[in-house]
Image (tube, rainbow, N blue to C red):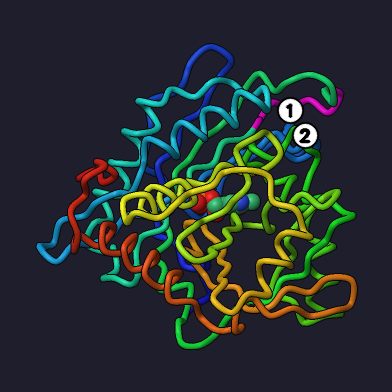
């Protein structure tokens, strides 16, 4: 199977902001866009994006998962980056139009159609390091994907980094390319030197998130994860898993979690940890690496509760369980 996010539908929906208003969205070829080499985004990283999925149900219908949440985060990222404001109704119409156009290509579960709204500053102005782009572009790109997590007994190895940071603290809740660029070097180093799969950023001992997913600790019937603040991305999957955990009668604790507490709890036999995200869904973590030592989470294997929560989320997404929170939008 092709690597996640490397296959694209041949068309995308696009709209341009000319300084006064958004152009009528159009479907255009998805293999190129024309930009001035002085475009604001190429110099000052005025860009944000989203990631959400459309699923095929057994009756042939196509449903998009928590589109409203992703559009709200897209609007917020745009605002916090001083990009032109998006019109959420227009973005929604663009998503619905392009997914409908390629409805026949939405894979069967466990696959899905990954939807990538993107917004960036286009103004040709290389003297605007401290001024916003007055013009911009947004498009909705589609990529059919398989199951990111191959399942089986595989668990992730995470390096706990309590000195570095994923990104500047005030940027954490913005889904912007620069944040991923700033996390790349530490992740590559951890992969090379420690065969880690990811880095769990814990600046000053505060357990935050990895490069592209939120972190959840599951201790018995309690799920513990960092409370929302501006330092990390407010994952839609995180919110969905916490809601499902509450529905299943579990205790959900959104609060500060320190590296010391994490290592102490991880040593208990039944403890589990997982990463949550649109791509990762809920992927089990088996090993934590800290200051040259390796610590198993529980028995180091795939945790029962992690599997149960993941299956409960997938069942809603795939139309096998009731959508009682109204998370699915029909196209
Ligand atoms: C840095 C980061 N944290 C968390 C997440 C999880 O967010 P979501 O569940 O909305 O996909 C993502 C994206 O997948 C991410 O890139």
Residue 1: % across, % down: 45, 82
Q: Is residue 126 part of the magenta span, yes or no?
A: yes
SS at circle 2? loop
Magenta stretch bounds: 121-127
Asked whether mark 1 and ligand 1 are closer than 8 Å, the reply comes as: no
The quadrant in which the C terminus is found is top left
- Left/right of residue 132 with respect to residue 221 in the rendered view: right
Q: Residue at x 53, y 63 (%)?
A: 218
Find residue 172 and name its label: none
Q: Residue at x 86, y 23 (%)?
A: 127
- Left/right of residue 22 with respect to residue 128 in the rendered view: left
Find residue 124 and name its label: 1
Q: Is residue 252 above or below residue 151?
A: above
Q: Residue at x 78, y 25 (%)?
A: 125
Q: Main secondary structure of the magenta part?
A: loop
Residues tagged 2 and 1 counted as in contact (Cβ below 8 A): yes
Q: 10 Å neighbourhood of mark 1: few (<14), some, or many (≥20)?
A: some
Q: Quadrant of residue 19?
A: top right
- Left/right of residue 275 with respect to residue 256 in the rendered view: left
Residue 17: % across, % down: 53, 23
Q: 10 Å neighbourhood of mark 2: few (<14), some, or many (≥20)?
A: some
Find residue 38 and name its label: 2
* Mark found first going from the N terminus, 2 or 1: 2
Instruction: Report whether residue 77 is seen.
Output: yes
């Amino acid at each position: 199977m092709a690597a996640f996010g490397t296959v694209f539908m041949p068309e995308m929906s696009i709209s341009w902001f000319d300084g006064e208003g958004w152009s009528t969205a159009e479907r255009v070829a998805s293999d190129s866009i024309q930009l001035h080499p002085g475009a604001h985004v190429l110099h000052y990283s005025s860009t944000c994006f989203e990631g959400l999925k459309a699923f095929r149900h057994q009756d042939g219908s196509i449903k998009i998962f928590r589109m409203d949440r992703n559009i709200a985060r897209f609007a917020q990222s745009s605002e916090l980056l001083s990009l032109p404001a998006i019109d959420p109704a227009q973005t929604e119409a663009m998503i619905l139009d392009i997914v409908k156009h390629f409805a026949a290509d939405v894979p069967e579960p466990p696959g899905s159609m990954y939807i990538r709204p993107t917004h960036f500053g286009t103004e040709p102005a290389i003297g605007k390091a401290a001024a916003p782009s007055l013009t911009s572009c947004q498009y909705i790109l589609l990529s059919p994907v398989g199951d990111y997590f191959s399942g089986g007994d595989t668990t992730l190895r995470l390096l706990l980094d309590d000195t570095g940071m994923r990104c500047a603290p005030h940027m954490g809740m913005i889904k912007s390319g620069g944040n991923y660029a700033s996390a790349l070097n530490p992740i590559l180093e951890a992969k090379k030197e420690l065969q880690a799969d990811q880095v769990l950023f814990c600046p000053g001992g505060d357990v935050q998130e990895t490069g592209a997913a939120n972190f959840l600790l599951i201790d018995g019937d309690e799920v513990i994860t960092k409370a929302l603040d501006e330092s990390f991305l407010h994952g839609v999957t995180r919110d969905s898993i916490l809601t499902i955990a509450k529905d299943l009668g579990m205790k959900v604790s959104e609060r500060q979690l320190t590296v010391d507490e994490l290592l102490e709890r991880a040593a208990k036999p039944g403890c589990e940890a997982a990463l949550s995200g649109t791509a990762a869904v809920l992927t089990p973590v088996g090993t934590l690496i800290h200051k040259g030592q390796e610590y198993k989470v529980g028995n180091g294997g795939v945790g029962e509760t992690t599997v149960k929560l993941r299956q409960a989320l997938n069942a809603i997404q795939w139309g096998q369980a009731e959508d009682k929170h109204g998370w699915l939008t029909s196209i």
